[in-house]
Amino acid sequence: MTTHRYTGGCDCGNITVDMEFTIDPASYQPRACDCSFCRKHGAAYVTDANGKVTISVKEKSELRKHRNGSELADFLICKRCGVLIGGVFEDGGGRCATININAIDGNEDFGQPVPVSPKTLSAEQKKSRWQELWFSDVTINGAEG
Ligand SMILES: [Zn+2]
């Protein structure tokens, strides 16, 4: 299988992201969530259930984990530069993540964002959707504790 590797992160370099996609970026349309939090950030999300993501945080005290809407997922924001990296959802032993297209270098390779409205889903529907679609191979360095 061909994989596509991308890196990214926040603007000041405190948070870096390394991704491996099995999807073809050109034919992938990032999901532009229509909740007010995501719209205010201009965020659209990229996920790949068969891909891989590593998020590394240098200075943990400069990482904000923000909960909004259903308060199920942590949205990772750099306190220093304000960039929204993406969302992480943990349930039992499992963890999945979605990455903001704006935090990815070379994001012009991806298709045009399509609007989505997860706020219309129930908490249970959201969880099962995320577990199905988001990156399931997630490593987070430096953010624990
Ligand atoms: Zn930053």
Image (tube, rainbow, N blue to C red):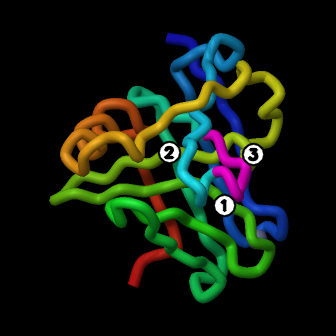
Mark 3 or 1, nearer chain start? 1
Residue type at the position of mark 1: Leu
Residue 8 tag number: none
What residue sits right under mark 2 in the picture? 98
Q: Where is mark 3, residue-wise?
A: 102
| Tags 3 and 1 touching, CB below 8 Å | yes
Is residue 42 magenta-colored?
yes
Q: CA distance from mark 2 to mark 3?
A: 12 Å
**In this image, 121 relative to 92: left or right?**
right
Marks 3/1: CA–CA distance: 8 Å
Residue 11: quarter of image: bottom right
- Residue 76 locus on image (x, y percent): 56, 65
In the displayed image of the protein, which residue is found farthest to the bottom? 61
Element type where label 3 sits in the image:
helix
In this view, 18 is above or below 16 = above
Residues 38 and 137: in front is 38
Nearest the eye: 107 or 14: 107
Tell me the magenta residue range. 39-44
**Percent position (x, y) of residue 89?**
35, 56
The residue under label 3 is which amino acid type? Asn
Q: Residues within 10 Å of mark 1 (few under 14, many from 20)?
A: many
Looking at the image, residue 26 sits to the left or right of residue 54; the answer is: right
Q: Is residue 97 magenta?
A: no
Residue placed most toward the observer, 38 or 108: 38
- The image quadrant of residue 73 is bottom left
Within 10 angstroms of label 3, few (less than 14), some, or many (20 or more) residues? Answer: many
In terms of image quarters, where does ligand 1 lie?
Answer: bottom right
Identified at 39% across, 85% down, the residue is 145
Mark number for residue 84? 1
Q: Residue at x 59, y 30 (%)?
A: 115
Mark 2 or 1, nearer chain start: 1
Q: Quadrant of residue 59?
A: bottom right
